[in-house]
Image (cartoon, rainbow, N blue to C red):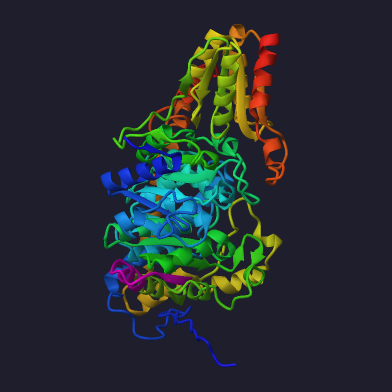
Amino acid sequence: MSIAAKFEIPFEQFLDPKGKPVKDLPKWADKEELLKLYKMMTKVRVFDTKAIALQRTGKLGTYASCLGHEAAHVGIGAAMIEEDAFCPMYREYGAQFMRGVKMSEVLLYWGGDERGSNFSGPQHDFPWCVPIATQYLHAAGSAMAFKYRGEKRAAVTVIGDGGTSEGDFYEALNAAGAWQLPFVGVTVNNKWAISVPLSKQTACETLAQKGIAAGMDVVQLDGNDIIAVREVMQRALEKARNGKGPTFVEMMTYRLHDHTTADDARRYRSDDEVEAERAKEPLIRLRQYITDQGWWNEDEEKALLADCKVKVDEAIEEYQSIEPPGVEDMFDYHYEELTDPLAEQREVAIKEARRNG
Amino acid sequence: MAKITLIDAVNMAMAHELGADDRVVVFGEDVGVNGGVFRATAGLQEKFGENRVMDTPLAESMIAGMGVGMAAQGLRPVAEIQFSGFIYPAFDQIISHAARLRNRTRGRLTCPLVIRAPFGGGIHAPEHHSESTEALFAHIPGLRTVIPSSPQRAYGLLLAAIRCPDPVIFFEPNRLYRMVKQEVEDNGEALPLDVCFVLKEGTDVTLISWAPAMHETLQAAKELEEQGISCEVIDVATISPLDMDTILESVEKTGRAVIVHEAPRNVGVGAEIAANLAEKGIYDLKAPVQRVTGYDVTMPLFKLEKQYLPSVARIKDAVQRTLEE
């Protein structure tokens, strides 16, 4: 047989796990930019740790940790512009903080209050998306709207490795390819979909190649290397905004925490595996690199951690000071105007709430 | 004014809105050059271009999910699902997102999306082409479910659906697509999405129906009239949110109610109407409420289709039962 077509999966990495450059860094990766990214990743880490603690002490509902994903998330946020649309899954806080979402709003959402999804930042961004893979189609639809109006904007969406088994994922990639939409799909491959390892999720050598099946450019990258994340995302977004079509990006990382606070990962994976992955996590390598450059020292690290703690504590205080919504809140946003049947039920609920004090 | 069919009216409403509002886009499987398998979109791509009237890849969840994305970013997408029987892959997007987007963002994002689909039985179609599933959609908070049953109402209600700031499931009775013609003026005037339509006034009994069964219901009313039984006939049209006021007002006058729908009886929309009549209109009722519906069986293939669908005779029998009490 002859060969009908041949494909390759490019891989991108700038910093190895020990913080050593494997090649020249991109021009933008100067002291100022790298410190900014490092500080944000640290803030995300402190926030995440505190949020887990809040859940453990009954002050937050189930929470999805982002431990180990800081480079992927913050790097995505750093590459986007305000006009782009972000369609997250449910743990991309790093990207959202970069876009202006407040920590207190994340807490409000996981604290069981829809108002958390009415968040700050670009008002066209989608809220957290719990039904797996559905967000991929919202990004494709957003990209279609941008293309239709001839706007220089792109839509970015994120999915886990497990999500790439879903129909909506394939349907979105296929549509983005067929219409050459300004779309950048990301899979944050953290090796585990709750308890199911990647090896049971797919026979593909890479997840990136799923994008090739949709006829788009793909890149696999070291998702613990924020320089690679931001650089590849910038290139893909520039391409998309200029009408040159979609890209699918696979970011290799590892979920260091449980799937959510309702999960116990010790049931299905070994401590040895987790510890081996922990050595490759994103903060260690960037800290090493900026320290090696003479841009960072232990005192600055201590001061940063103290500052992050203060800011996170302030956010928690803000979250806890927000009064619960009134009972009418569950009726008022189903239709632009309250329908007659709902108006009737709303009155009943208000009376009932009064009676129950 | 020319007389047109229901499907012509659907086409005319889309053409009107495509012409009036740049945000409106029509998309679905085969809606472009082919003009849709029933020809609901015939000529629209030619007139408005491939950017406004788009053939999609064959993927229903994609059609609904991308519709959510487009709507949230300021377009007014009008999607076609080729048959309502193929809508189930899109169910997740409709329930989890289209219907919830406004509520879960507290109004920050909205979903002015219309999903049109041919609907109901009676055209000798293959398997999965003839079901009546309005109750599945009526049950979902945040959605509107609308089913026109005449060319005039198809035009006015589809205009309203496209202009509606919230998602609308718009089922088109394919049996009625070409059954009758009516004068419909292309005047851009929408009909309200929150009322039932009283098609005929009467004093003895209220017949409440919607979708293709409206046809048999009107026929039954006509024949009963000849026997001296005065029927008031209501087309519910907007199944959800349900306008009970019009129905209650009518039953207050007639004291009798017969509900007719093609969908299975169990947990059908007829049950909701009957329950409302029991809660709010029981003292006006002179006889138990009757339902004439499809049976609680899988929609049969077309050799038994006629036996499944509510017939004029069954409707007349139900009316007689209300008069005997």
Residue displayed at 34% across by 60% down: B50
Residue displayed at 68% across by 41% down: B305
Along the line of sight, the residue nearer the viewer: A271 or B88:
B88
Query: Is residue A246 one of those drawn in magenta?
Result: yes
Instruction: Point out residue B159 in the picture as x, y percentages from the top left corner.
Output: 36, 38
Residue A248, above or below B117: below
Residue A310, above or below B144: below
Give the left or right position of residue B11, taking residue A351 as reference.
left
Instruction: Point out residue A152 in the picture as x, y percentages from the top left corner.
Output: 27, 63
Over which residues does the magenta segment extend?
Answer: A235-250
Residue B267, above or below B17: above
Residue A306 shows in the view: no
Query: Is residue B210 one of those drawn in magenta?
Result: no
Total residue callouts: 0
Q: Residue furthest front?
A: B226
* Quadrant of residue B153 within the rendered picture: top left
Give the left or right position of residue A81, taking residue B216 as reference.
left
